[in-house]
Image (cartoon, rainbow, N blue to C red):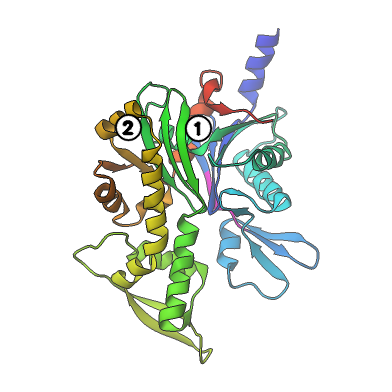
Amino acid sequence: MSSFFRNLTERFSNDVAIDLGTCSTLIYVKGKGIQLREPSIVAIDDSDHKVVAIGNEAKKMLGRTPAGIRAIRPMKDGVIADFAIVKIMLKTYIEMVQKKKLFVRPRIIVCVPSGITEVEKRAVHDSVEATGAREVYLVSEPIAAAMGAGLPVEAPTGNMIIDIGGGTTEIAVVALSGVVNANSIRIAGDEMDEAIINYVKKNYNLIIGEQTAENIKITIGSAYATSKDEIMEVKGRDLVSGIPKTIKVTGAKIREALEEPVSLIVDAVHLALEKTPPELAADIVDRGIYMAGGGSLLKGLDALIKEETNLQVFIAENPIDCVVIGAGKILEDISGHAKLILETQ
C-alpha cells in the first residue's frame, strides 16, 4: 500500500528544482524542464510592506522607484539576506510554475554555495519549506553545475568546475559524488558591476546605475585583450554639475575596471588547484577545466584562465542554466542520486 501511495503521490505532485541565485531564480519542473527564469528582485511599498512587483517587473524599477517604494534584492552573495522577502518571492515563483493547485505538496531541490555555513543552510531550508514544500533537499552548487555541464560527477575521475554567478564564484574539484575540495569566494558578477560603477565615477565623474553597469559588462566588458577595441556610449549623471550626460568608454578601459575582481577569481582558481590531490590533478590536466554561470560569459575570461594555469578551459554548453539543469537531473531520480544531497542539521 505504501508503494502504491508513493507512486500516486509522485504522479500528482509537481516536484521542482530551484537555482536560487543572487541575480536570478531558475525553476526546473520534473518531467518538463526549465519553466521559469526571473530576476531575484522584489519591489516593496514601505507604507504597508506589501509587494508591488516581483521578478522582471521589479527589475525594471531598479534605480527608478519613487519615494516609498523599494526594489530589493533579497539574496546577497549567494545566501539569503532577507528571509521574509525570499519566502514571498519563492512562493510566487513556485505558484507560477504550478498552474493548477495540486493536493500533493511538491518536493523541492534547492542549490546552495559550497562555502555556505550551517546557519545559512538552515535559512535556505526553512524559507523553502515555508512555501509549502513536502520535502526540501539541498544540493551543492558545484555538484549541480558539474552535472549540468555533463561531467561524470559519480566517476572516480577528478573534474574541475568554475561556476561564476551573480554573488559567488564556486571553484570545485568533483569526484565520486562529492566535492573533493572547493574554494567559494564572494566575488562574481555583482562585484564586476560594482567595479565598473566605481571606475566610471572615479575616471569620468559620472554616476551610473547597476543596470547600466551590467549592460556595459555584457556589451564591451572583457578579461583579456582582443584585437578589436569596442566603444560604447554611456549615459549617467554628472557628479559635479548633477546634469545628465553621455560619455564614450572603450573596452580597454572597462577591462582595466574589471582587473581586480577578475584577478581575485584567477587567484582562487590557483588556490583550488594547489589544494587538489595529485591523482585528481592529473585528471584535470587530461580533462581540463569547465566553466559555468553567467560570469563565465565575460569575454576572454576562459582565455585568461587558460594562460594563467596552462590547462584547457571549456565553457559549458548552457552556462547560465547549468546549475538548474544539474539540479533537475537529480530531481528526476532523487533516490538514485541520494549521495549528492547535502545533510542539514
Label 2: how many residues lie within 10 Å, few (<14), some (14-19) or many (20+)? many
The residue nearer to you, when weighing 66 against 238, is 238
Q: Is residue 269 above or below residue 138?
A: below
Residue stretch rendered in magenta on the structure: 36-41
The residue nearer to you, when weighing 110 against 190, is 190
On the image, the x and y values in percent for residue 190 come to 50, 59
Q: Residue at x 61, y 61 (%)?
A: 58
Which label sits on residue 281? Answer: 2
Amino acid type, residue under disc 1 in the picture = Gly
Q: Which residue is drawn at 36% across and 63% down?
A: 259
Amino acid type, residue under disc 2 in the picture = Ala
Q: Is residue 321 visible?
A: yes
| Mark 1 lies on residue | 328
Q: Quadrant of the C terminus?
A: top right
Q: Is residue 325 visible?
A: no
The residue nearer to you, when weighing 62 against 189, is 189
Could you say which quadrant of the image residue 298 lies in?
A: bottom left
The mark nearer the N terminus, 1 or 2, is 2
On the image, the x and y values in percent for residue 57 come to 59, 61
User: Any magenta on residue 50?
Assistant: no
Question: Nearer the observer, disc 1 or disc 2?
Answer: 2
In the current view of this chain or complex, which residue is farthest to the bottom? 241
Q: In this view, does 228 lie to the left or right of 159?
A: left
Secondary structure at badge 2 equals helix
Q: Which residue is drawn at 53% across and 39% down?
A: 114
Are discs 1 and 2 less than 8 Å apart at CB?
no
On the image, the x and y values in percent for residue 131 come to 71, 40
Q: Which residue is drawn at 76% across and 67% down?
A: 46
Q: Quadrant of the N terminus?
A: top right
On the image, the x and y values in percent for residue 9 come to 66, 21
Q: Is residue 263 left or right of residue 61?
A: left
Could you say which quadrant of the image residue 160 lies in?
A: top left
